[in-house]
Image: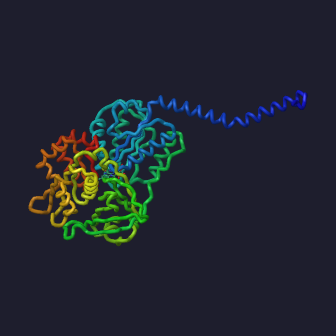
């Protein structure tokens, strides 16, 4: 029905309909434009050579940050892949568009174990890398002489090869939040996004100290305690043998201390083995003093679990296992032995060293029971204060050279837990002498030589 023949009115009405139509279509047009732009971006991204997030980590902090870095890049639509430093090839270095390195430092300014082969094989080469743009996040602890030594060495080597840094190396002292926030900020500038996922670490939770008993009464060494803890809310979280806990002492919650977990979830509790740390002036370590002396059974301990992927069994679950350690290092090894018992894996060989058999043979009854049930066919013990000759765990290895080579030839993995001073270097040297340094580096690169040393 036509209500008017007036051409002016008709034109006005048609104009109104057009404007109305455009207003209605505007959101759909915007969405279509966005989708097209997104598809074009994705197509371009698929063609780009891509970014690499490379990490070298011992206890998992750098690895965790690398995962979060990757997630941020992916959210920004940047094609990127995660890669352990040891898996990085010369070709990757030459061809990757950008590489973000997140690396920690171990030993005395060294690379983490898994990156030892990269440090010795790649970082000793002269490679032209003029195309490479990179950034370094170096994790370390200022109380060590060679603060961030490996991160600094990597940065310098890259520079010498002609690579260009995207921004100044960022150094993180003891996982300090401000430095991590600075990395995150640089990352969002690079990725052109403010849409970064939450990077905050899980919160500490309240755990009840259910049991504490000294294991080495009469020992010449500092007292060592077996502790058992249960979550206050009753819900036991999942963890795997090899993982750690962080304990925040009430005197200074910012100075959390890490301990290896000595139990598996099937035990229903987190077991720890804590040596009371006594300073030169007789005062106690802030965390060990709290756990071993001040906290009363029944009291609440602030604790959180930390995945320690480098010391888990993972692909080694089906392999024979050689467990080497000293002192409180038996904690991490006991966690593995308990997991192996639960899984029915019996090819286990424990080499353990302490001071005196009479006082320092931690978990003696449990070890005896494993021996009897066939769960622990290999057991060698070294006591440094029994008898005239000081004998340490590394001294056990030469006499067992043939057995060691046989087990490794059978695919065994080697796990070392305990003190860095003396033990870790001594065991490493003994293994390198018996197996060959290159073969040992190769085992580390394959994840068959893993260490939790402190
Ligand atoms: C046994 C041991 C040795 C360490 N040596 C150094 C060192 O020489 N220089 C340094 O800056 N940090 C050193 N650290 C500190 C680590 O680099 C720091 O804790 C880092 O956050 C660990 O990161 P990750 O979990 O990725 O390995 C050492 C830590 C341990 C347990």
- Relative depth, front residue between 109 and 45: 45
- Image height of 441 relative to 308, above or below: above
Q: Residue furthest left?
A: 388
Along the horizontal axis of the image, is 435 left or right of 167? Answer: left
Q: How many marks?
A: 0
Across and down, in percent, residue 115 comes to 31, 42
Q: Quadrant of residue 233?
A: bottom left
Q: Is residue 95 visible?
A: yes
- Please report the residue visible at 34 percent of the width from the left and 61 percent of the height from the top: 268
Q: Is residue 145 left or right of residue 360?
A: right
Q: Position of residue 247 (x, y in %)?
A: 37, 61
Tell me the quadrant of the picture where the N terminus can be found.
top right
Residue 343: x %, y % from top left: 28, 51
Q: Quadrant of residue 15?
A: top right
At which x and y percent is residue 60?
A: 36, 49
Left or right: 141 as drawn, with respect to 47:
left
User: What's the image's color scheme?
Assistant: rainbow
Nearest to the observer: residue 303 or residue 86: 303
Residue 433 showing in the rendered view: no
The residue that appears at 28% across and 43% down in the rendered structure is: 447
Q: Nearer the viewer, residue 247 or 43?
A: 43
Give the position of the C terminus as an image quadrant: bottom left
State the residue at coordinates (38%, 47%).
62
Observer-nearest residue: 112 or 382? 382
């Amino acid at each position: 029905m036509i209500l008017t023949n007036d051409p002016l009115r008709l034109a006005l009405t048609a104009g109104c309909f057009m404007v109305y139509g455009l207003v209605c279509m505007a959101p759909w047009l915007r969405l279509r434009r966005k989708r097209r732009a997104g598809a074009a971006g994705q197509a371009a991204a698929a063609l780009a050579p891509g970014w690499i997030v490379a990490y070298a980590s011992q206890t998992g902090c750098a690895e965790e940050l690398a995962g979060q870095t990757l997630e941020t890049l992916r959210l920004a639509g940047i094609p990127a892949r995660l890669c352990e430093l040891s898996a990085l090839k010369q070709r990757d270095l030459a061809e990757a568009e950008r590489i973000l390195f997140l690396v920690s430092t171990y030993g005395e300014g060294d690379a983490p174990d898994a990156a030892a082969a990269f440090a010795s094989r790649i970082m000793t080469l002269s490679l032209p890398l003029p195309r490479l743009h990179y950034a370094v996040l170096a994790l370390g602890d200022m109380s060590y002489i060679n603060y961030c030594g490996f991160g600094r060495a990597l940065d310098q080597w890259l520079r010498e090869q002609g690579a260009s840094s995207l921004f100044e190396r960022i150094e993180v002292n003891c996982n300090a939040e401000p430095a991590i926030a600075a990395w995150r900020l640089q990352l969002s500038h690079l990725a052109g996004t403010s849409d970064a996922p939450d990077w905050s670490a899980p919160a500490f939770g309240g755990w009840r100290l259910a049991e504490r008993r000294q294991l080495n009464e009469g020992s010449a060494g500092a007292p060592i305690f077996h502790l058992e803890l249960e979550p206050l809310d009753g819900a036991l979280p999942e963890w795997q043998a090899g993982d750690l806990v962080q304990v925040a002492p009430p005197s200074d919650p910012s100075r959390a201390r890490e301990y290896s977990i000595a139990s598996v979830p099937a035990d229903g509790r987190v077991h720890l083995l804590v040596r009371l740390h006594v300073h030169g002036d007789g005062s106690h370590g802030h965390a060990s003093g709290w756990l071993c002396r001040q906290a009363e059974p029944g009291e609440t301990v602030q604790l959180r679990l930390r995945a320690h992927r480098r010391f888990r069994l993972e692909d080694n679950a089906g392999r024979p296992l050689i467990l080497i350690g000293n002192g409180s290092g038996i904690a991490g090894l006991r966690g593995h032995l308990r997991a192996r018992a639960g899984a029915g894996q019996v090819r286990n060989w424990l080499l353990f060293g302490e001071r005196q058999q009479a006082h320092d043979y931690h978990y003696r009854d449990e070890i005896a029971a494993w021996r009897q049930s066939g769960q622990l066919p290999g057991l060698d013990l070294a006591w440094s204060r029994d008898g005239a000759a000081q004998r340490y765990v590394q001294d056990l290895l030469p006499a067992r050279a043939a057995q060691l080579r046989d087990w490794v030839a059978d695919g065994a993995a080697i796990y070392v837990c305990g003190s860095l001073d003396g033990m870790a270097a001594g065991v490493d040297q003994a293994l390198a002498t018996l197996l060959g340094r290159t073969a040992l580096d190769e085992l580390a690169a394959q994840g068959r030589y893993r260490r939790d040393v402190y």
